[in-house]
Image: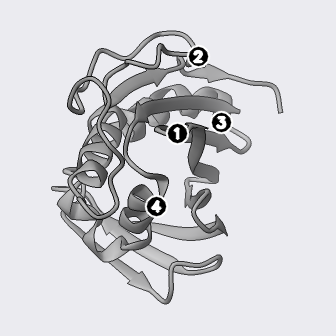
């Protein structure tokens, strides 16, 4: 299994982030890696999504799991591999939320192909998750009060996310190094 995780801490309200996630047809407004997107049904388990990155072939996703206002999982099958992306909201305190994107690649050749395929798929995550946090903060009716500074992208840390001081920026990224895990 190949795994990569990236997270951002933000003062955006979890409901604001959730509304952006649930509005699949408008993901391209905050995700620059989407040229076009189509959802066939409600934002719910089992629904299919076709997402086309700029200059690339369409990617067919299936929503594998949804826990409203907490997390959703999408899956894609590519060359016998299962690419599973977990999108999760972790409430840290009354004013902070951690937005987590986690990629798990499994299948017979995951240990061999994952280290090439995974970074290509997740390369834009720092920008995408930071843009999601900024878009959520821009929703005045849903945003929480900003703490010390506006949402700024900072270089990702090479270690798992650690507790951050209460006066951290409105969006502060964290990433783990891609790695192979035993299934």
How far apart, in angstroms, are the residues tagged by discs 4 and 1? Answer: 15 Å
- Residue 160: image tag: 2
Kind of element beneath mark 4: helix
Residue position for label 3: 110
Question: In the image, is residue 110 above or below residue 139?
Answer: above
Residue located farthest toward the right when viewing the structure as drawn:
183
Residue position for label 1: 100
How far apart, in angstroms, are the residues tagged by discs 2 and 4? Answer: 25 Å
Identify the mark nearer the N-term, 2 or 3: 3
Residue position for label 4: 15
Disc 1 to disc 3: CB gap under 8 Å: no
Q: Nearer the viewer, mark 2 or mark 3?
A: 2
Q: Nearer the viewer, mark 4 or mark 1?
A: 4
- Please name the residue shown 27% across and 49% down the image: 137
Kind of element beneath mark 1: strand
Identify the mark nearer the N-term, 4 or 3: 4
Report x, y in % for residue 131.
Answer: 25, 44
Q: Is residue 34 left or right of residue 121?
A: left
How far apart, in angstroms, are the residues tagged by discs 1 and 3? Answer: 22 Å
How far apart, in angstroms, are the residues tagged by discs 2 and 1? Answer: 11 Å
Identify the mark nearer the N-term, 2 or 4: 4
Identify the mark nearer the N-term, 2 or 1: 1
């Amino acid at each position: 299994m190949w795994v990569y995780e990236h997270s951002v801490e933000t003062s955006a309200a979890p409901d604001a982030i959730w509304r952006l996630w649930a509005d699949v047809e408008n993901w391209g407004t905050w995700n620059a890696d989407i040229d076009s997107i189509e959802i066939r049904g409600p934002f719910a388990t089992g629904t299919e999504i076709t997402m086309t990155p700029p200059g690339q072939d369409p990617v067919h996703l299936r929503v594998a799991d949804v826990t409203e206002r907490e997390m959703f999982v999408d899956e894609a099958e590519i060359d016998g591999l299962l690419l599973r992306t977990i999108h999760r909201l972790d409430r840290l305190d009354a004013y902070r939320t951690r937005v987590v994107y986690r990629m798990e690649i499994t299948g017979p050749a995951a240990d061999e192909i994952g280290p090439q395929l995974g970074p290509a798929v997740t390369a834009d995550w720092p920008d995408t998750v930071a843009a999601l946090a900024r878009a959520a903060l821009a929703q005045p009716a849903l945003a929480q009060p900003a703490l010390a500074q506006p949402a700024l992208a900072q270089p990702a840390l090479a270690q798992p996310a650690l507790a951050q001081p209460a006066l951290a920026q409105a969006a502060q990224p964290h990433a783990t190094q891609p790695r192979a895990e035993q299934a």
